[in-house]
Image: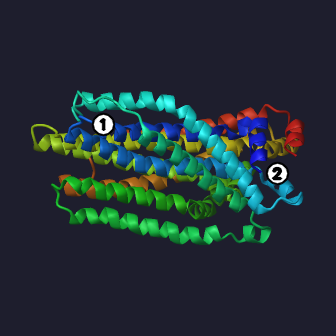
Amino acid sequence: MLFLAVRSIRKRPGRFLATLLSAFLGAVIIMTFGSLHDTAAAPGVDGASADTMTIAASVVGGYGSLLVFFAIASTLTVAVRQRAEEIHLLRCTGATPAQISRMVVGESAVVALAGAVLAVGPAVLGGRVLLDLFRDSGQVAATVEPAFGVRALGSGFGIAVLASVGAAFLAVRRATRSAAVARHPRGHRARTPAGCAALVAGTGGVLSTYAVDSSAQTLMAFPAYGAILLSVGFAVLAPSLLGRLLDLLRAPLAAFGGAGGHLSARNLRRRGAESAGVLMPMIIFTGVATATLYIQGVESAWVEASGPGRSIDDKNVETLNLVVVGIIVAFSCIMLVNTLYAATSHRSREFGQQRLAGATPGQVLGVVARESVILTLTGLVLGTVAGVAGIIPFTMVRTGHVLPDQGPGTWLAVLGVATAVTLVTSLGTARRALRTPAIDAVAVAA
């Protein structure tokens, strides 16, 4: 099966491009911050500089590892689901589920290794640039020289390969289940308690902010982690929440959108797994970015108002928060683009059938646009709720006000990025798919 996996990659490299991109960018980020561990362990580095670099590498490494797994898992889940016919054919020719799993896992491991190898050069340069930023801000001594060694390479290769192998194993396991299990998947039964547990933990995190002293340096941790857990909980519960929303929007969509509106609601309900794959990164991106940026803005304003200047610890916290938000933005956008592109391009046969039934390209694009708008509004509302739930307690405890003084500009920017990525990717991919003649699209996809 490993030989078959290598041949599959050689014959159809485009199919694995999204996974390669996720593994490459993930390895770059992990190795870049992993190099700070090597630099901190180098001889002659003072204790304060070593502590700063170690904390930064540990915090971002933990977030980065989780995001790498989610990005690769999102990409692989869509890719494996679209190979259902190929997997069914292999089963019919005598392949066992274990053999198919080894093939798909082998493909993912090879792609992840290639992405990690390609990431070494950019990670070396990124580590030097990152260290320069720390030195220029005074958080690290100017005499510290960059290092790139075993810890950076081990963390980058290890996390990229393990995330790819684990995500591929879970994706192919779901794809090879029997039809009876597919009709009653256990994952849906486990999804609800897991999402509810994350919501309860997140609510406890944001409410515990009120029990912390208003001048404590650790105050930011409680609402920030609470907002993250709330975002994760909403993301896990996204399929069921979207279903309830569609029940409410069914009549308005049919009244104002006609047959196209009814078809949009029906498509979203029928493709619940693909819709959830789009909502998850959007909710996490909106909730975490909104909460972290506003909480950091309130904290920076409070520090400047309460003293002559910011300490090294304050600068470290601000740098870490901004870097974490940057990583979340990058990976959420990658997850959104990969999932939307794969899900929309795979609908070429569906678009061809609609056109053969009499729909014009404009009507098909209208259906896709309404689907994208519904998904965007759902993700933005849930993400905003998670973010505001973390912002209000922190602002009340730190400043005594309910809302921060930064205004809605940051929130609007976050919404704008999420909306632009969703609409541009989905509509652009659909427009490209419509360039193929309807008969050819149906024949090729069949």
Q: Give the left or right position of residue 344, taking residue 164 as reference.
A: right
Quick one: 384 or 76, which is closer to the camera? 76
Secondary element at image label 1? loop
Q: Secondary structure at mark 2?
A: helix
Q: Horizontal placement of 402 versus 21: left or right?
A: left
Quadrant housing residue 396: bottom left
Q: Please, is residue 84 above or below residue 39 in the view?
A: below
- What residue type is disc 2 on? Glu
Q: Position of residue 282 (x, y in %)?
A: 52, 48
10 Å crowding of disc 1: few (<14), some (14-19), many (20+): some
| Residue type beneath disc 1 | Ala
Disc 1 or 2, which lies upstream in sequence? 1
Instruction: In the displayed orientation, state which residue is furthest to the front.
Output: 43
| In-front residue for pair 123/148 | 148
The answer to whether residue 369 is visible is no
Labelled disc at residue 42: 1
**Cα gap from disc 1 to disc 2, whole angstroms:** 51 Å
Q: Residue at x 57, y 41 (%)?
A: 22
- Image check: 339 left or right of 140? right
Task: Give the foreground label among 1 and 2.
Answer: 1
Residue 445 percent coordinates (x, y) = 84, 43
Give the x, y percent position of residue 69: 54, 51
Q: Which residue is mark 2?
A: 86
Which dot marks residue 74?
none
Colour style of the rendered protein structure? rainbow
395 lies above or below 241: above
- Give percent across and percent down for residue 122: 48, 29
Q: Are marks 1 and 2 in contact (CB under 8 Å)?
A: no
* Residue reaching furthest to the left: 308
